[in-house]
Image (cartoon, grey):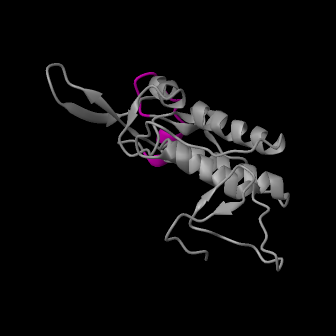
Amino acid sequence: MENVEQIQQKPPQEGSPMNPAAYPDLRAPGPSPDLEAMRDAYLELLALALCDLTGSGTLSVHRRLGSGVYARELMVDETETRIRGRDWPLHGLSMAGLLRLRDVRRCIEAAIEEGVEGDLVETGCWRGGASMMMRATLDSLARRTAPSGSPTRSRGSRSLTGSSTPRTGSSTI
């Protein structure tokens, strides 16, 4: 029987379970005292988690011939399918894939930077992963303050500029 050191030293092989070391792009940036670097690390880690790519392995759902579905571990040579959003993650919160979640983030950041007004909506969502990424990106860019200068939070909808519009029956926290 192999010990842990021997197993960890083996390079990932085609047909073997996913190994995050084989994909350096599947890592969030390291810690930094810079606020923007911390925001970037948070959002990248969130995207990885939404795609269920933070652990040593991940399960993917597949259809059986005839009827039914089954789950199996995603193999090293199949990791690209998850990155591109072309599989059905058993435990992930998004089927969009890592690349699309990064694109959602970039689009929101660009809209905020360019001062685009309006709202964001995700249509046809599965478990809401893209909506979670939108919310986290907006929250990480928020510079909202109440008239007294204290930060505000609301249970209402928010526009791209971050202003809150409470829904009927909602209260401001």
Query: Is residue 86 found left or right of 151 in the rendered image?
Result: left
The residue depicted at 81 percent of the width and 75 percent of the height is 147
> Which quarter of the figure is the N terminus placed in?
top left
Q: In the orientation shown, which residue stands out farthest toward the top?
A: 65
Q: Residue at x 72, y 60 (%)?
A: 163
Whole-percent x, y for residue 168 in the image: 51, 66
Observer able to see residue 30: no
Q: Decide which of 52, 163 is in the foreground and name it.
A: 163
What x and y, as percent, mark residue 112? 78, 45
The percent coordinates of residue 145 (x first, y second) are 79, 70
Quarter assignment of residue 67:
top left
For residue 144, say whether it is visible.
yes
Which of the two residues, 78 or 128, is positioned nearer the viewer here? 128
The boundaries of the magenta stretch are: 3-17
141 magenta-colored:
no
Magenta segment includes 10:
yes
Q: Main secondary structure of the magenta part?
A: loop
Q: Position of residue 81 (x, y in %)?
A: 48, 25
